[in-house]
Amino acid sequence: MDKLTLLAELNLSTFIAFDFETTGLNPEKDRIIEIAAIKYEQGKAADKFVTLVNPGFEISSFITKITGISNEMVANQPTEDKIVKPFIDFLGDFPIVAHNTEFDRNFLNRLITRHDLTLPARNYYDTLPLSRTFLFFQPTHNLSALSDYFGLSTEGAHRADSDAENCGSVFMELIYEAASYPLELIARMLALIKPFGVFNEALFSDLAAALAKSGDLQKGLMLSKIEKPLSSNLFMHAGPGSIADFNSGDVFKKDGFLSRTFESFEERLSQINYAEFVEETLLAEKGLGIAEAGTGLGKTMAYLFPCIKKALQEENGPVVIACYTKHLQDQLFNNDLPLLARTLDVDLTAVVLKGRNNYICKTRLNWLIKSAEKLLGGDEVTTLLTL
């Protein structure tokens, strides 16, 4: 299915992306200082309503620093009573999308209430939970990060015009990605959120209907163009090398294996001594060793080499390294262990295990989803979409 047909199927041939800059976070007390609404037609920005707004009181230096909007900039701009009616007329009854929609809608509703106006019913969409759901591998989901991810300009970030336009573009990328999933998964998501009336419900409902109409229940409506880097808990390296006769000095001295890999390698006697102590302890028939070393010694490599040597002895069982933090565990498994295994060029298999709190029990997850209406709130079910 092409993109324009998809937008029509999802009732999004025309929609409005909008963003407010405000004097603070409280819609009861704070006021809007900039409005930007971008009307998208057939997937392209076609019209806009953009204006600064005089809030009627001083803008704090903190807000000016964030938004770049100063008191001087709004001094001669219209007050909200002058722009509210043209703004509402521009919005019409078109679907609205924002990033963290709850924030902007709260300010919109207060604006309308203050001036005794009403808004037509419409569907609301939110790019923030959509990003958390379909870009689950991304570390951050603020609008600037998403704009960078999709190759959009972030010049003028935290100004309403730029943010609204990027929000609209990000929204389309996210619905194209959502459309790549099969009906079974989309229907499951819809069943989860439907009782709660959360943002994006209309998207999942229309998407499920379009998928059902397509007749192919195993495929999405579009092919995903997003590479999803899923990490594995298994590391394997095949190599012809043998380190049975090597000692710690062969690895860590100035002419050792590591020095051939790193141009900036420096021999550290304390690292060699540490590695020799661990090797002696591990390879002894019965060994118990206690050691402490400060930052910068290179101790992770120093104990990894003896651990690899121990693991490669056929009569031994697996070597277990327990880490105090997930950060250290990730460093060992993703960086240090692969680097050392490739430097030594030996056969090695390693697996990473985390505490039970880091794993999902699918049976309990399914039970929670089926009981969500009784046990959870709207915000909580939205976070479950990522799973």
Image (spheres, rainbow, N blue to C red):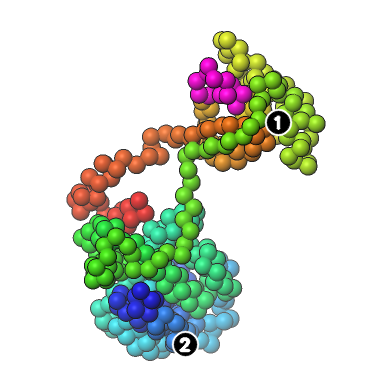
Q: Determine which of the numbered discs, if any, sits on residue 193 in the image.
A: none
Q: Please report the residue visible at 56 percent of the width from the left and 10 percent of the height from the top.
A: 286
| Residue 278 appears in the rendering | yes
Front residue of 382 and 310: 310
Q: Please report the residue visible at 24 percent of the width from the left and 50 percent of the height from the top.
A: 369
Prevalent SS, magenta region: loop
Percent position (x, y) of residue 148? 55, 66
Front residue of 366 and 375: 366
212 left or right, relative to 154: left
Magenta stretch, residue numbers: 307-319
Q: Please report the residue visible at 68 percent of the width from the left and 36 percent of the height from the top.
A: 343
Front residue of 230 and 371: 230
Secondary element at tag 2: loop
Mark 2 and mark 1: Cα distance apart in space? 63 Å
| Residue 295 appears in the rendering | no
* Vertical order, 231 against 305 (above or below): below
Mark nearer the N terminus (2 vs 1): 2
Around disc 1, counting alpha carbons within 10 Å, would you say few (fewer than 14), some (14 to 19), or many (20 or more)?
Answer: some
Q: Which corner quadrant of the image does residue 367 belong to? A: top left
Residue type at the position of mark 2: Pro
Percent position (x, y) of residue 104? 39, 71
311 left or right, relative to 131: right
Q: Quickly name the residue at label 1.
A: 297
The mark lying in front, picked from 2 and 1, is: 1
Around disc 2, counting alpha carbons within 10 Å, would you say few (fewer than 14), some (14 to 19), or many (20 or more)?
Answer: some
Residue type at the position of mark 1: Leu
Q: Please report the residue visible at 47 percent of the width from the left and 87 percent of the height from the top.
A: 78
